[in-house]
Amino acid sequence: MFPNPASGSLNIELPLATENVLLTIENVTGRIVATKSISTKTSKVHYPIPNILTGIYIVKAFTESAFYSGKLEVNK
């Protein structure tokens, strides 16, 4: 996941190419602040985050066969 810290967009590189990815971004209290379903044929996902405030978040990516998560710092 890069850049980290992020300001305007986020790039996620998954280990395998996939067709459907569900992304969620949660704040430190566990509240989902953003969610998006993305269809892609590659292992790379680009996700704009213009409405995410400065802070620490957990990004989760759900695919057909796996689950990935990581810590994200947003600096605006």
Image (cartoon, grey):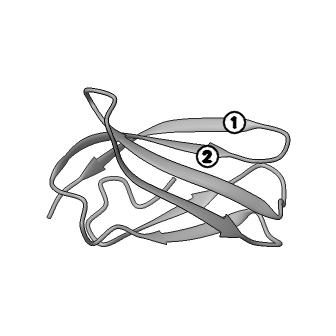
Identified by mark 2, the residue type is Ala
Identified by mark 1, the residue type is Phe
Please tell me whether residue 37 is drawn above or below residue 65 in the rendered image.
below
**Numbered tag placed on residue 67 in the rendering:** 1
**Numbered tag placed on residue 38 in the rendering:** none
- Horizontal and vertical percent for residue 14? 71, 52
Give the quarter of the image for residue 6. bottom left
Report the front residue among 64 and 74.
64
- Horizontal and vertical percent for residue 42? 79, 69
In the rendered image, which quarter contains the C terminus? bottom left
Cα separation, mark 1 vs mark 2, equals 6 Å
Instruction: Classify residue 46 as left or right of residue 3.
Output: right
Report the front residue among 29 and 58.
29
Please tell me whether residue 61 is drawn above or below residue 21 in the rendered image.
above
Q: Name the residue under label 2.
A: 61
- Horizontal and vertical percent for residue 38? 65, 67
- The answer to whether the residues at label 1 and label 2 have Cβ atoms under 8 Å apart is yes
Instruction: Classify residue 49 as left or right of residue 7.
Output: right
Instruction: Classify residue 35 as left or right of residue 4.
Output: right
Callout 1: SS:
strand
- Horizontal and vertical percent for residue 30? 34, 29
Give the quarter of the image for residue 40. bottom right
Instruction: Say which label, 1 or 2, has the lower sequence index.
Output: 2
Q: How crowded is mark 1: few (under 14 residues within 10 Å), some or many (20 or more)?
A: few
